[in-house]
Image (tube, helix red, strand yellow):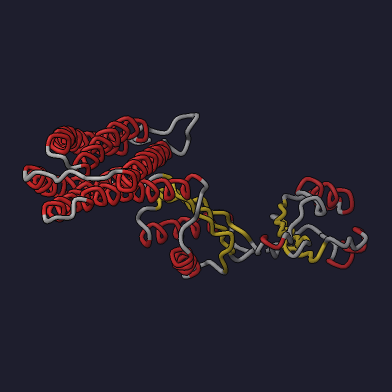
Amino acid sequence: MSSSHQHRLDGEFRAASRVTIIGMVLDAVLGLLKCIGGWLFHSQALFVDGIHSFTDVASDLVVLAVMKVSRREPDSDHPYGHQRFETLGTMILGSFLIAIGGALAWDNLWRIIASGELAVPGWPVLVVALLSVASKEWIFRYTRKVGERIRSDLIIANAWHSRTDAFSSIVVLVGAVGAMAGFPWLDAVAAVIIAVIIAHVGFQFAWSSVRELVDTGLSNEDTHRLRAVACGTEGVRDVHDLRSRRMGSDILVDIHLVVKPEISVSEGHQIGMQVVRRLREAQPQIRDINFHIDAENDQQGIITSEQLPARREVHELFREHLPELARVRHHLRLHYLDNQLYVEIFVDEPGHAIPSHDVVMDRLGHPSWLASLKLWQPVGK
């Protein structure tokens, strides 16, 4: 890995750590205020919202631990990098939120069903809830901006988790106002709604992470767009086996490119590099592209090396049945197409008698795998 790339990773980690620590301190302060305020002034919704803030603290700790690992450079055990650790961290965070949300929803739903008279929240509940809305909206915008800049799904996910805390504080406000207006059960209903919000956000995080961990590819729309870009590259006849998967914020692509069979290996490679450049222009998140150059569409299993002779066997066959080649410099060009072999023999020296095509074919016995034989010899002076 280049030093510039590692420097970029280090800078991304520093930015992620800074915004995460700021958010964690804010979450801890808000969580403490909400839990104490909810307990002292009889608001179960505010107390649950405080638990929500403390889950943000837990998520921040997960982010700090995972971001450190996911920004490491590739090694022998992880040649593609460590971005999947970020995905794993997001899945753990999502699962944790689902569990917390489910437990809180059940507890408050049971309070509504089983309890008789419910307490009415005091006015300080409104002050704490308003403070939470303003603070969490600010940290959401700040965190999301950093996450988009360093292309981190985990940081962006953590930002949206912060915004859910702002949404839940609005629910606290509505529930508290309703309870003060003579509907005390609204505070407990607000607590259930907040718990459901927590669980829903956790499910979204966990589900998107699971899809990545099982190598879910790009959408059909994005895949068709990349295929069109590759097919539109000069020298590409067809494209097949276009596969993709995600690794953190990066995309990995495998693609087979069909080119003219008569071109050189180096020209085929150059065409592939042009496809790589154009695909990255079309989708900047693509980090790695593996391309395979085909002379024909091998997706149908046309080429079977077990049935066709290799170069060494072909060379020995011609040395046995065409001894005239042993006296001159020559080279072979082999084309494996349509499950047959097309052979070109290039004699590098003029003036040497080489048997005609028909004579050579008779000597070889017209093998079924030999589709074509061409003899090339320079004209003598």
Q: Is residue 310 left or right of residue 153?
A: right
In the displayed structure, would residue 225 be above or below residue 20?
Answer: below
Quadrant position of the C terminus in the picture: bottom right
Q: Nearer the viewer, residue 149 or 256?
A: 149
Q: Is residue 313 left or right of residue 136?
A: right
Q: In which quarter of the view is residue 146 placed?
A: top left
Q: Nearer the viewer, residue 228 or 189?
A: 189
Identity of the residue furthest to the front in this view? 116
Q: Nearer the viewer, residue 132 or 80?
A: 132
Quadrant position of the N terminus in the picture: top left
Q: Position of residue 375 (x, y in %)?
A: 76, 63
Q: Is residue 181 visible?
A: yes
In the displayed structure, would residue 272 be above or below residue 120?
Answer: below
Q: Position of residue 307 (x, y in %)?
A: 82, 54
Q: Nearer the viewer, residue 353 or 381?
A: 353
x 65%, y 64%: residue: 297
x 80%, y 54%: residue: 308
